[in-house]
Amino acid sequence: MRIEIVAVGTELLLGQIADTNSRWMGEHLAAIGVASHFHQAVGDNQERIVLALRTALARSDGVIVCGGLGPTHDDITRDAIAEVMNVPLERDDGVVEKIRALFSSRGREMPDSNLRQADVPVGAVVIPQTKGTAPGLVCPVGHKVVYAVPGVPYEMSDMFDRAIAPDLVGRMADRGETTGVIASRVIRTWGMSESGLAETLADHIDHLDAAPQRAGGPAGTQRAGGAATVAFLASGIEGIKVRVTVRGADAEVASALLDEEEARIRDILTAAAGDVVFGVDDEAIEDAVARALAVDGLTVGLAESLTGGLAASRLVNVPGASRWFRGSVVSYASEVKFSVLGVPEGPVVSEEAARAMADGARRVLGADVGLSITGVAGPDPQDDQPPGTVFVGLARPGSDTESFAFTVPGDRDRVRQYATIAALDLLRRTVGRPPGGRVGSGSAR
Amino acid sequence: MRIEIVAVGTELLLGQIADTNSRWMGEHLAAIGVASHFHQAVGDNQERIVLALRTALARSDGVIVCGGLGPTHDDITRDAIAEVMNVPLERDDGVVEKIRALFSSRGREMPDSNLRQADVPVGAVVIPQTKGTAPGLVCPVGHKVVYAVPGVPYEMSDMFDRAIAPDLVGRMADRGETTGVIASRVIRTWGMSESGLAETLADHIDHLDAAPQRAGGPAGTQRAGGAATVAFLASGIEGIKVRVTVRGADAEVASALLDEEEARIRDILTAAAGDVVFGVDDEAIEDAVARALAVDGLTVGLAESLTGGLAASRLVNVPGASRWFRGSVVSYASEVKFSVLGVPEGPVVSEEAARAMADGARRVLGADVGLSITGVAGPDPQDDQPPGTVFVGLARPGSDTESFAFTVPGDRDRVRQYATIAALDLLRRTVGRPPGGRVGSGSAR
């Protein structure tokens, strides 16, 4: 099964926004074993959308067209699909009612232009919306298919997971194609460089590359099993990711292969560098903090200067954070550090200030553990410290209040992001340990 | 002149890397007045690259193909171009020497595989490398052209600026085309729906569509000036964007056309819906807050419950925030609201609590203006209020403390993001007004 992705929007051609949708769909098509040999982007022009769809249908088994389903005059994907199907559009009363209900639930009148979104090519099946107004479409074109989804990323991904992926898997089964799955898992690390990780895992990767294809599923299914492949992703600032990819006869087999491989990689990394793995897949550093605090049922309070509330805003992302997160004193002005947190007057970018802030956070917020972050985002130095300087304070029961010094790279925004993750990583490593025990290193990445 | 971009690389189709090159080239083609109606991505497969190139040449005047020029066995763009040109490849001795020299300047032996990079389709002209090993190519195909550039972003952009853009401008002049520029500006709004904006601007858009091509440059240059086009972008949660695009003889003319059109659209929107425009292009809501506070030199302090530090972390994004931002009390636990902010014990998701939090923030943080955000992120109700309930409090000099109630859609994360932007929008609208003046509506989007 070969599916081509067609992204619609003049803003894509003009480079005004990045086409993150095609990338997301490419990744998720591969995950269910669907090949994608071509992607296209096209502007908000009916003739050209029609041409792009016809080109795609000529060289693939189906198309996912993304965008151009909004309520305005330049949203013409529906019209283009109807032209390709050679059918008229017909207003769907069920969709009209859903859109009207959505508006009235928000206490607003539905503008007439939204009615356009209820126009459906005759013969197409609606993918109901759960998040916005524009429904998706499943449109048969001969024995091929055109799926249409909105360009809003979370509406697109919802419809892909809920309707398109199951439909594709059904079509592949009908065609007698093996629906083996390619599955991958991302092991998330903080504290090692990409080259350090690669060197630590080099022997293991050589071993995998040399391994014969292993049986990962029922005998006779050629694509059922195989050795894992390992890749490193230095994607952004959330640490280095180690991605393991396997192919299995079904999701269960693939998952077992991934478990096995994850355990092996964790063992190798822990033996070489300690507690550098903080989670897998979408688990973020704040999820690891929540897990570490839960061990002893501790609560935490923050005092943030440099990071301006960023660390707190990450902690509240964790469902159930109210059980262990007390709050944060964002003491951006120095006087707030003195008056609210009780920091002694003097330089506020120092290890002493970081410790006093952590003590203050613990006391003022009534928390078991106090974590503080102060430093210099730049571009100018402060208190004689250069941009990128970060001090983290940590106050916890039964231990002296500690402080840690880092230097992190990048501009204002990146300094803040790095400092946040580094501080939360310290918290994660520390609260799981016995009082008085010190964490090894304060490496920022 | 219409140029299609073809990005080569299986990793693009699999979603393993983002196609930032096509975006960059789309933006830079537009800047020199070259239209781009289609982009394609294709994997490392000669047959499919050939098909993508033929498809592109059939519907555009030329192609820029990006990637697949490396030294390894899967770098086959050169072979595909030779097939499309129907010519053989020939090793270019000059290129061999350049690559060899590059290696020896780095004290390394050139691997034989790099010789592939010196293979040039007969009839093509080499774009010399200045940064890496793979040369670019300018390949005539009938009266059309295929440009090939490496996929390494800084090598691609260097060759584009140095060779492709000048070559395209020359071809446009030969064709008698005016080499005007396409420029656009994004007008950013908060408080109106996409369809509401579209209806408000419908008459104006009809007027633009009906307008004859206006002279935007020297007389006689048919494409030098033109009516603006207007599009709406509901990109994520940062409000609805109105994008205006114009074509002008040069950057100065285009900029003047944009100024004119921006002023007209601001007038129409302000007359219909009040102060809904908060900025242009990359200006975010926090930049608008900073501007509004600067008018009277006011400082602000926050009290955040629902948003957990998110509002504070946005305000510190603005360079120079320390001049007007005091800090935030992230009072996630109810006891912190009582003990630190002086909120009376009782329900903490209420207009009363929001006002007490705003007063508390102003007092505790020593700020001129106090802004508070409380509410329910979900999934469970709190204090009998459903998820999506948001209360904002605003305390400022010379006015009674006010509160505002919203309902915002979405999951936990979106509720928080919406609430943050809605609260900052209220702050922006309010602090610019005389004391006692009330803002009109508390619409969340």
Image (tube, coloured by chain):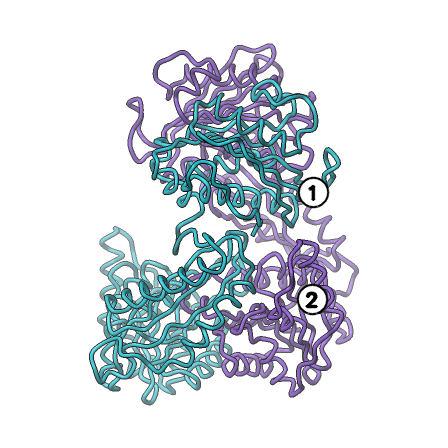
Chain colours: A purple, B cyan
Determine which of the numbered discs, if any, sits on residue B375 in the image.
none
* Quadrant in which residue A142 is drawn: bottom right
Q: Is residue B291 left or right of residue A48?
A: left
Bin the neighbour count of mark 2 within 10 Å (Cα to Cα): few under 14, some 14-19, many 20 and up: many
Which label is found at residue B387? 1
Residue A266 location in percent, x, y? 61, 37
Q: Residue at x 41, y 14 (%)?
A: A352
Q: Quadrant of residue A141?
A: bottom right
Residue at screen point 53% across, 50% down: A231
Check the picture and name the quadrant holding the N terminus of chain B. Answer: bottom left
Chain where mark 1 sits: B
Please provide percent x and percent y for residue B308.
57, 34
Residue type, numbered disc 1: Pro
SS class, disc 1:
loop
Three-letter amino acid code of the residue under disc 2: Ile
Considering depth in this image, is B219 or A341 the residue closer to the camera?
Answer: B219
For residue A164, the mark is 2
Quarter location, residue A386: top left
Front disc: 1 or 2 = 1
Q: Are marks 1 and 2 in contact (CB under 8 Å)?
A: no
Q: Tell me: B199 left or right of B210.
A: right
What percent of the width, then of the height, locates residue B129? 26, 64
